[in-house]
Amino acid sequence: MKRFLTLAGAAYFFAASAVADLRATGDLGVVIERETGSVQVINTSTPKMLSRIEGLGDLSHASVVFSRDQRYAYVFGRDGGLSKIDLLQDKIEKRVVQAGNSIGGAISQDGKVIAVSNYTPGGVKLFDAETLEQLAEIPAVYGDDNQLSKVVGLVDAPGGRFVCSLFEGNEIWLIDAKNPRQPVVKKFKDIGKQPYDALLTPDGHFYAAGLFGEKGLALLDLWQPELGVKHILDDYGKDDEQLPVYKMPHLEGWTVAGELLFVPAIGLHEVLVIDKHDWELVKRIPVVGQPVFVMSRPDGRQVWVNFAFPDNQTVQVIDVKDFNVVKTLQPGKAVLHMEFSPRGEAVWMAVRDEDRVMVYDTESFNETARLPAQKPSGIFFSNRANQLGL
Amino acid sequence: MKRFLTLAGAAYFFAASAVADLRATGDLGVVIERETGSVQVINTSTPKMLSRIEGLGDLSHASVVFSRDQRYAYVFGRDGGLSKIDLLQDKIEKRVVQAGNSIGGAISQDGKVIAVSNYTPGGVKLFDAETLEQLAEIPAVYGDDNQLSKVVGLVDAPGGRFVCSLFEGNEIWLIDAKNPRQPVVKKFKDIGKQPYDALLTPDGHFYAAGLFGEKGLALLDLWQPELGVKHILDDYGKDDEQLPVYKMPHLEGWTVAGELLFVPAIGLHEVLVIDKHDWELVKRIPVVGQPVFVMSRPDGRQVWVNFAFPDNQTVQVIDVKDFNVVKTLQPGKAVLHMEFSPRGEAVWMAVRDEDRVMVYDTESFNETARLPAQKPSGIFFSNRANQLGL
């Protein structure tokens, strides 16, 4: 009878722990810990760390997308690793090394397909989001000799499509992946020299690729792709004299706030404001350093800016109403990334050299939490599952 | 020993069922079944019904908001009932009847406070989102005799605020609920006769209240509330001759697509297009009946429209690119409500008199699923947790 009670107790324990473990996925996220190849699973409501998951390989320049149910985080590593993390069970569900050198990825509008953009071998691969089975390989061939190009600026777009750019190929590709085993590629050639990164406007309407080999950007209107690619912002971009490669600002550092784009100036202590209607520069806002990420609060009222070394301990906040800097914060050494809560009441910052994540209230600018992290370099919240073009 | 095995089996069963029950909350939703006072919990990826929850009282004109983690649905019933449904455990977590007659509610930007707007007694009540403990009661007093007004058009706004309108009071109230036990109310008086409903633009910038007692709308710029309330769209609204109360279109049937508002014309077979910059009418689009809900696909490329009786078996789709009706669908008798998936690849429709929910692909316009439901009247997906002004 003692054994009976013990076992009933065991059964009760299982049931009770099942209830205690119930976890929703709407307010989860991951923090990238680059040097240790690990990620933290975090809860943004509490806020707190739920777990640390290791063994994710080279996480330099890592990016993350989320499954439609916000249960799984797909982590794209620099080493070609594609890892599917289960946020409910705090473990790696599946991991494949799908290329030698990879630069990012995207998840299809319906959540069923993961796309990865690779440097080596240059191309795009499509995977089943559930199993990580490879569905298609699209080599980034260009030119008369069928050379392979590095692929950059890969995003999902409405209509079950992906868009990407070929760095050496000088092309933009519009990939219809509604049948992901037989994707159909529409190629736009000679779009400008060496597209190095790109963005999709949050409404999925425009795809803009930054050019490394010349000034300006290449713009594709996805509502009217038949019109081809246009060249915009002729004065924006590379100046050979002063700009080493590593200072080219990634376009993921651009932001759209209402009808305006806020963009880091290259090599200058300025944020540029661009009108989305005509893609013309309307304003230069002086800031404390060379901007890296220029990020809009979800409601578009504020834009938060972090900076390159030696100003990377500082964050500034611009009020979109009148383009003034309304706050300067000093979160600590090496603020590398920021992420807003879905409705914008809070912003999280990865402060690498202080080994911590900081949380601020965006109205009062007060610090509301700090969490320990190992050299955090990126923060990604699960509500990204609901957004286009990430 | 037999008992031992049986109990070990029982323990195993508990553990196994706990794993099998793991459910994420990013792709959940509820379908309102008005006549039976029940809701279905549904999964939008599969798609399928997960459960039916009964005992929710009078669900006519019911609306729903979701907790920050997308685990709980708060259902506002007409009878003053406020029900908190646990989407992970398929049950009512808590239910209070907080007024005699209620018209809707909202959840604060940080997810901590539920606000309910009441007709009887007229006012707003604030509740703790976790416990449903009442935190504050704000009677809608107006005029010299401190009469009580019905409260309508309650929405959440950035900065921990709520906004609502007083139907008999002719006022708009901006409620600072950062300290929800001691909310601070800023009152805008004489804003126009009998505001009957309102909307917040998705960026949280503008609050617009429709007027029952006169033509036009009252507009409050939440970025500059000190400028007071303006009167806009002087030709839009009530015409005593032709419009009984029940035909006044609710402003939740309005939609913002990029820089344009799409609005049901009153008493006409038209959708009106309004420029958000100057609030002027720029286009009238002929449609098949009198529009009820005019809803933008999340990327703003399409607008879907359903209609009042006798045209409520029809849905039309407008292409925002050129304002043409590009598709006319016949989902069945009494299409009462529509809800888009977060990234817009699918739309769900409550087809009341066919006792079913229909799902369509928004690119091909093909039907992709139909689910049985008891006189469905409304559909709400959990990603609403991430949106302002709902």
Image: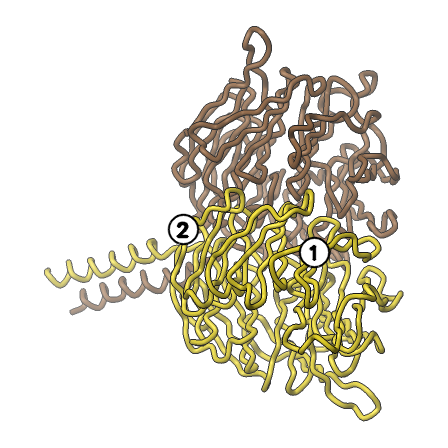
Chain colours: A yellow, B brown
Q: Quadrant of residue B46?
A: bottom right
Q: Is residue A332 above or below residue B121?
A: below
Q: Residue furthest top?
A: B145
Residue A335 point in image, percent of width and height: 51, 63
Q: Quadrant of residue A102?
A: bottom right
Residue B253 point in image, percent of width and height: 71, 36
Residue at 38% across, 62% down: A372
Residue A298 point in image, percent of width and height: 61, 50
Q: Amino acid at mark 1?
A: Phe
Image mark for residue A262: 1
- In terms of sequence position, does the residue under pointer 1 or pointer 2 come before the other? 2
Q: Is residue B337 above or below residue A11?
A: above
Q: Residue furthest left?
A: A2
- Name the residue that disc number 2 marks: A46
Q: Quadrant of residue B352?
A: top right
Q: Is residue A254 left or right of residue A194?
A: left
The answer to whether dots 1 and 2 both sit on one chain is: yes
Q: Tell me the SS state at disc 1.
A: strand
Q: Chain of mark 2?
A: A
Q: Chain of mark 1?
A: A
Image mark for residue B334: none
Q: Tell me the SS state at disc 2.
A: loop
Q: Amino acid at mark 2?
A: Thr
Query: Mark 1 against mark 2, which lies toward the viewer?
Result: 1
Residue at 64% across, 46% down: A319
Disc tally is 2
Residue at 73% across, 67% down: A161
Asked whether the beta carbons under mark 1 and mark 2 sit within 8 Å of each other, the answer is: no
